Amino acid sequence: MTKGVVLFANNNEQVDYIKQAIFCTQQIKKHLDLPVSLVTNSSDHLYKQYSTYVELFDKIISIPKVNSGQRKSFRDGVGPVKKLEWNNLNRSDVYDLTPYDETLVMDTDYIVANNQLLNCFKVNNDFMIWKEATYLNPHGKVWEIKYVSDTSMEMYWATVFYFKKCEKMKTYFNTVQHVRDNWAYYRWIYQIASKNYRNDFAFTIAIWIMNGFEENKEWPAKLPGTHYYIYDRDQIIDFNDNKFTFLVTVPQDQKKSTATTVKDLNVHVMNKLGLQTVIESKGI
Amino acid sequence: MIEQGYLIYANNSNKCNYTRQAYALSLSIKLFNKDAHVTLVTENELCDRIRAGFDNVIVPHKVPVSQSVLNSEQRCHAYNISPYLKTIVMDADVLVTENLDSWWTYLANYMVYYVSDARTYRNEKSDAVTYRKTFIENNLPNLYNAFHYFEKSDEASRFYRLQQMIVENWETFYTKYTPKKKQKWCSMDVSAAIASKILDNYESITDSDSFVNVVHLKPQQQGWKHNYVNSSGAVTLHFSDNNFFIGNFKQHGIIHYVEDQFLTDELVNNLEKANETVLKV
């Protein structure tokens, strides 16, 4: 059985996901020692700008550049919002794209700092994903996301997940694709306010459908460890010696923030612009 | 006397067609419990379609009109009027979503049983504080009349005689036992709770951790962030392939939907069709 990690990187006007993928891969190599394949519509950029890093990747899987038609707000802490292209539509194609029998899929802004995820490969589950998550901002209760919408089910995070190739997972990803391709309908059915397609929601809806519209504690299984995250309203200041330093924002008074450090934890750094700055400081 | 059955009270008002609700409830019971015997207690004349939904219809003795809006004067006679040795009593605005054989087996351990665990449609423990202030402020047992059970026995007879006395003298009892946040009308929930408190039998007539619970659809106990005035403005109730769904959540057990808007004609028609299928099988 082949094992590996798949990352997706589709650049927009300002966020260099290729750069993030390089840093993300360096961290994966360091802590998980797994081959990493990159699915990207920006492979030219990789070969031109980062030719010395190409060998980091096991495989480069080029996909055509398609305008997603979606724009999303990107923040860097409390700074002004930038509306940029949001190209997240091909994550549900991963079943056919992955070169591995057992695959970990990660966002490029998920920074690995320990080897906990290796435990995925030691247990016999076809699908593992997190539902519960811990927001590293102790003031940020009002920004926490629990449900897909106010009246619907608890959300699974598609940030990181593990799957094994099998008929059930093929059906699952077909279902995610069906939700993606009929997003306007599912948005309406599940009372989702945002027009943008969101993988967390589509993955959750597909799980819900597969489980007969009810909670199933057996499937999917929970990933090992805990899902930690910060929002794009929080700032990443530094990542050094496996230690993150964040400035987490107080929602009620956004001029205020609190410094927080965490060490040896994997963290989903949703402030992509801030993460990019930190990565650039590493010389990438 | 029949061994066991279901008893439903329904008198139509100018605001709500309760006999239609009772009809839908009976259809839902019979769909999943094919030998179920269902009795309706009503003052209303029934059309053939509605009448066909019940095995038995009882016309109650007329009682003086009072301030009550919840038909308590009649409902407190459930114990005496029931033609069954073992009776499940349900409010008309309830639907059954599954076979209740295991519920009957469980209830056989009790002489009287009241549901005390309300759930959201997402099967989460419900926060009923908003609607249960009288109970909380006066330390009353948290009982729901929407689903209760009794077996004809001395113990049950004593309980329901006392409950009848409370209903018939509700202002006096409410003043004494619910001085804080006193309700201005007679309710079966409060009356049952006072009876239980006087008899000190809470432990023997309910279990708040039981699987016998009720999905209660009042809006402020659903855990929503938005302050919906009506639950029916937030989620839909529908019936498909013999399953009930609320807001895309498959339902189990008993649904107390409260708002008549949930009971669409389409839902009733689908229940009728499903029952025809069952009868043919």
Image: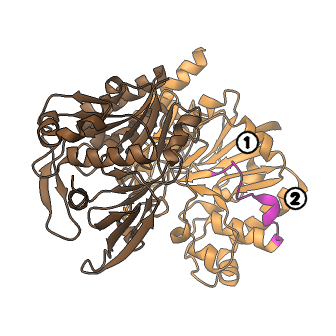
Q: Residue furthest front?
A: A52
Residue in the picture at 74% in, 65% down:
B164
Q: Amino acid at mark 1?
A: Trp
Q: Nearer the viewer, residue B279 or B54?
A: B279
Q: Are marks 2 and 1 on the same chain?
A: yes
* Residue annotated with mark 1: B103
Q: Colour of chain A?
A: brown
Label drawn at residue B155 = 2
Would you place residue B234 above or below residue B182 in this image?
A: above
Q: Residues within 10 Å of mark 2 (few under 14, many from 20)?
A: few
Q: Is residue A85 magenta?
A: no
User: Quick check: can you spot residue B206?
Assistant: yes
Q: Nearer the viewer, residue B93 or A59?
A: A59
Expressed as whole percent of the image width and height from the top left, the position of residue A168 reads 48, 24
Label drawn at residue A184 = none
Expressed as whole percent of the image width and height from the top left, the position of residue B203 reads 80, 63
Numbered disc 2: what chain? B
Q: Nearer the viewer, residue A10 or B48?
A: A10
Residue in the picture at 19% in, 28% down:
A63
What span is in magenta?
Answer: B199-213
Mark toward the viewer: 2 or 1: 1
Q: Nearer the viewer, residue A250 or A164?
A: A164
Residue in the picture at 87% in, 58% down:
B155
Q: Amino acid at mark 2?
A: Glu
Q: Residues within 10 Å of mark 1 (few under 14, many from 20)?
A: few
Numbered disc 1: what chain? B
User: Which quadrant holds residue A173?
Assistant: top left
- The chain coloured orange is B
